Amino acid sequence: MSIRVMSQVWEAYPGGGSELLALLALADWSDDNGKCYPSMASISKKIRLKPRQAKRIVHQLIDDGFVQVVGNEFGGSPGSSRQYRLILSRLTGVAHDTRRSVSDDTPTPETGVMQGIDGCHGRPETGVTHDTLTVIEPSRTVRESAQARLSSQKGGKKKKPITLDRFLETCKASGEQVIPGDDPIFEYADAVGIDHAMIAAAWHVFKDTYRQSDKLYADWRRTFRNSVRGNWKNLWFIREGEQAKWTTTGMQAKREMEA
């Protein structure tokens, strides 16, 4: 345990909630250089969350640049867990971005997560979507977003099928996220081992495909979820016991998205 690193996290990490607990847990295991190698099971036990929730939080810290994977990227058997390093240079009182702000077209350079999925696996205020600790309620943003969608669904009016372009325009006009951070597709991706950069590439291809067509859907978010679950464009493949890996088609889509 490094008292120095833990103190630095307490004093300088700009977030809170489950993310702060996870970063403190990593600091508790780390040496003075911020290096540690706990298993995901150990992390989840320490912060009292389910493994998939803990995994999502750690991924968020990695995406935000506070943690880096420096060894055993895909983990493995006991004794070969991922090796992490806390980026101590980030813990200097930087301002906290309440949610990754994204537009409709441009990928995020650092992580490959597309701007088109507004808030893709983003951090609502200081919490993490879907993830709640026993004494920590979901953020107000998530609650209000979920309640608004539920109220809309109960309103009685059936959604009219529209084009993808019209759906994107509607989201932009209302300030609504195209694919919100609490969308079920992210929980599904974590459960089956699909990297969020792959979700980004899937959205890039999906958007490119349907913006050039006159196809009509009443629920474009559900259609996108179906495309990911079915791997419609064959962007990745999964072997038993392994994380998803890019196909050649997927790598091409990823590079096109990042260009």
Image: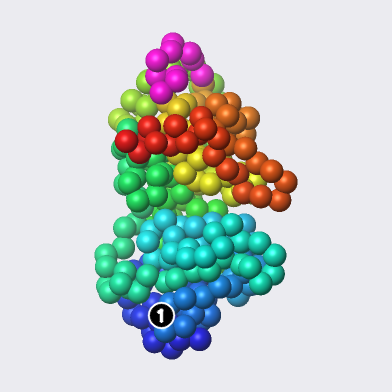
Classify mark 1: residues with Cα within 10 Å, few (<14), some (14-19) or many (20+). some
Residue 197 highlighted magenta (yes or no): no
Q: Mark 1 — residue?
A: 33
Give the magenta-colored segment's residue range. 208-217
- Counting the numbered discs, the total is 1
In this rendering, the answer to whether 179 lies above or below 47 is above
244 to 42, vertically: above or below: above
Closer-to-camera residue (127/120): 120
Display coloring: rainbow
For the point 33% across and 46% down, the residue is 109
Q: Residue furthest front?
A: 248
Note whether residue 19 is visible.
no
What's the residue at 50%, 46% (across, down)?
196
Q: 68 and 80: which one is in front? A: 80
Q: Let me know if residue 211 is in the magenta part.
A: yes
The amino acid beneath tag 1 is Asn
**8 w.r.t. 213: above or below:** below
Front-most of residues 95 and 134: 95
